[in-house]
Image: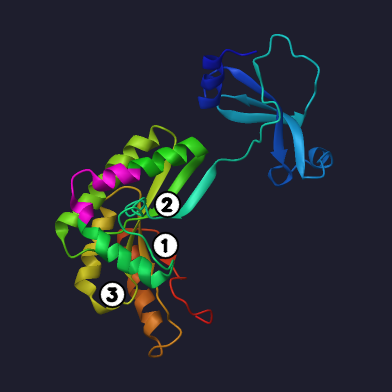
């Protein structure tokens, strides 16, 4: 068996070769038809997976024959999955239930809870502590890419905006070295991109000044309103995104209208 340090080095991209023996791989993660054909009734395949330099270099049906002289670990049937991507999180306001519980689980109470809790975010260490716990949990459970809305970056208080960006910048750098890609979304209510152009311009410029941040909008219910309004709002958003060479994240489901 391979010593633990050598196994860790192989997984991180060292020079060692590592064979993960007897790992269970879900059918959905396999493209080789000869492997897929051996799936059990649960849609899983027992495999031997070879890694070199931190990259998967081979996947084969598990061979019980001993492999003398080869670095190997017996996974004993453990599941092997691609790393998770958590594409929609709110790391600025997460883990606040003990002090600000949403009584109904509804969107309206969620927004009310955020308004109530947001003044606490400026307190030293508050956002840092909650965001760090969330990212440590991601790391522990196998998530390797996280997108978070940067709630508070559209606040009228410059100190609040700076606090959120400062914490995000620090955590992005810290967790990049630990294997997590962290992306932030600077959110603004979609109509404001057209209706308050000076505020929107500042918001976009702020986002562009921080690495790993994209421009975001939450759209609300656009099923009723003056004709062409949503087109105008989107045009203003994309104009700023193009000006600053920013990608865009649209939050289009934040309403209770199924016909929207």
Q: CA distance from mark 3 to mark 1?
A: 15 Å
State whether residue 242 appears in this view: no
Asked whether the beta carbons under mark 2 and mark 1 sit within 8 Å of each other, the answer is yes
- Which x, y percent locates residue 128? 27, 43
- Which x, y percent locates residue 81? 62, 39
Structural crowding at the residue carrying mark 2, measured as other residues with C-alpha within 10 Å and reported as few (<14), some (14–19) or many (≥20): many
Question: What residue is pinned by disc 3?
Answer: 192
Question: What residue is pinned by disc 2?
Answer: 147
Front position in the image: 154 or 14: 154
Membership of 211 in magenta stretch: no
First of labels 2, 3 by sequence position: 2
Front position in the image: 216 or 26: 26
Structural crowding at the residue carrying mark 1, measured as other residues with C-alpha within 10 Å and reported as few (<14), some (14–19) or many (≥20): some
First of labels 3, 1 by sequence position: 3
Whether residue 42 is situated above or below residue 251 in the rendered picture: above
State whether residue 132 appears in this view: yes
Q: Residue furthest top?
A: 69
Left or right? Give the position of 169 relative to 228: left
Q: CA distance from mark 2 to mark 3?
A: 23 Å
Q: Which residues are magenta?
A: 120-131
Left or right? Give the position of 258 relative to 177: right
Question: What residue lies at 40% left-to-right and 62% top-to-bottom?
Answer: 248
Q: CA distance from mark 2 to mark 1?
A: 10 Å
First of labels 2, 1 by sequence position: 2
Which mark's residue is nearer the viewer, 2 or 1? 2
Question: What residue is pinned by disc 1?
Answer: 249
Structural crowding at the residue carrying mark 3, measured as other residues with C-alpha within 10 Å and reported as few (<14), some (14–19) or many (≥20): some
What is the secondary structure assignment of the residue under circle 3? helix
Quadrant in the picture for residue 125? top left
């Amino acid at each position: 068996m391979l010593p633990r340090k050598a196994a860790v080095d192989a997984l991180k991209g060292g020079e060692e070769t590592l064979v993960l023996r007897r790992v269970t791989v879900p059918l959905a993660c396999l493209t080789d038809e000869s492997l897929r054909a051996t799936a059990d009734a649960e849609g899983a395949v027992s495999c031997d997976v070879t890694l070199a330099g931190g990259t998967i270099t081979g996947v084969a049906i598990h061979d019980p024959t001993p492999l003398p002289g080869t670095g190997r670990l017996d996974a004993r049937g453990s599941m092997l999955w691609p790393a998770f991507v958590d594409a929609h999180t709110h790391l600025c306001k997460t883990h606040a239930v003990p002090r600000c519980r949403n009584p109904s689980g509804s969107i309206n109470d969620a927004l009310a809870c955020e308004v109530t809790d947001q003044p606490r975010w400026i307190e030293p260490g508050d956002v840092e502590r909650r965001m760090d716990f969330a990212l440590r949990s991601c790391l522990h459970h196998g998530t390797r890419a996280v997108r978070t809305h940067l709630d508070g970056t559209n606040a009228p208080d410059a100190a609040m905006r700076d606090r959120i960006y400062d914490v995000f910048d620090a955590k992005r750098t810290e967790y990049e070295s630990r294997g997590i890609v962290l992306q932030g979304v600077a959110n603004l209510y979609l109509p404001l991109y057209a209706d308050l152009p000076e505020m929107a311009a500042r918001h976009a410029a702020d986002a562009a000044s921080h690495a790993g941040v994209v421009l975001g909008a939450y759209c609300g219910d656009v099923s009723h309103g003056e004709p062409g309004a949503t087109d105008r709002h989107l045009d203003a958003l994309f104009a700023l995104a193009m000006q600053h060479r920013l990608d865009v994240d649209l939050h289009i489901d934040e309403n209770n209208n199924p016909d929207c």
